[in-house]
Image (cartoon, rainbow, N blue to C red):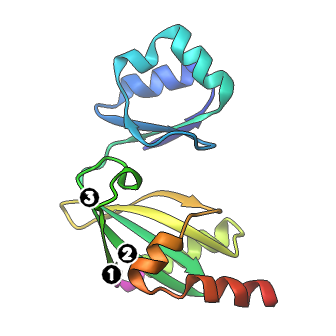
């Protein structure tokens, strides 16, 4: 479950309905964190939500998977890291992975439904082997992943821009 909001009542209600949650601002500026009671203090909440809506999600234990979707192709990487937000882990291991066909089809469907030409989709692969959709990012960082995996993302972006 996820909530994107800058309404403190909605945020508090959602936070009370779940056990373990993570949050991050919609517009960036900080990394994903576990939601703590101190984050929900009225003055702090008012300040934060006055700057930007936040994304709050149920914490899903498992492995990070990122799928880049461009020109009808899906390039996916498994990100092995003990950090809650792998972007903070310079030692994170990036391993190209082939997703099941149905998940690749979901990647294409999500991209089409959001009317995006390209995107990065974040998943969590649960211990039960389920792929849980987290978000689709219309402006994802990719150079580090490209350099570590050899995915032709820059080349595909150039093709997209030339058409």
Picture coordinates of residue 99, whole percent (x, y): 36, 81
Magenta range is 98-102
Q: What residue sits 35% from the left and 23% below the top?
A: 36
Classify 160 as above or below 12. Answer: below
When asked about the image quadrant of residue 19, the answer is top left
Q: What residue sits 63% from the left and 87% below the top?
A: 156
**What is the secondary structure assignment of the residue under circle 3?**
loop
Classify 11 as above or below 126. Answer: above
* Pointer 1 or 2: first along the chain: 2
The residue pinned by badge 3 equals: 81
* Pointer 3 or 1: first along the chain: 3
Q: Judge whether residue 71 can be spotted in this image.
A: no
Picture coordinates of residue 134, whole percent (x, y): 45, 55
- Residue 77: give its label: 2
The residue pinned by badge 1 equals: 97
When asked about the image quadrant of residue 45, the answer is top right
Q: What residue sits 23% from the left and 52% below the top?
A: 82
Residue 121 magenta-highlighted? no
Picture coordinates of residue 6, whole percent (x, y): 63, 28
């Amino acid at each position: 479950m996820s909530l994107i909001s800058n309404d403190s009542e909605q945020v508090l209600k959602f936070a009370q309905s779940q056990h373990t949650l993570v949050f991050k601002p919609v517009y960036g500026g900080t990394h994903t964190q576990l939601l703590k009671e101190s984050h929900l203090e009225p003055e702090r909440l008012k300040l934060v939500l006055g700057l930007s809506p936040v994304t709050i999600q149920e914490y899903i234990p498992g492995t990070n998977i990122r799928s880049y979707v461009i020109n009808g192709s899906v390039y996916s990487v498994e990100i092995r890291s003990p950090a809650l937000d792998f972007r903070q882990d310079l030692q994170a291991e990036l391993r190209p992975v082939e997703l099941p066909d149905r998940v690749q089809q979901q990647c294409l469907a999500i991209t089409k439904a959001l009317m995006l030409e390209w995107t990065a989709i974040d998943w969590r692969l649960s211990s039960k082997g389920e792929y849980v959709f987290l978000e689709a990012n219309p402006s994802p960082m990719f150079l580090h992943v490209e350099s570590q995996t050899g995915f032709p993302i820059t080349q595909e972006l150039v093709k997209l821009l030339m058409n």
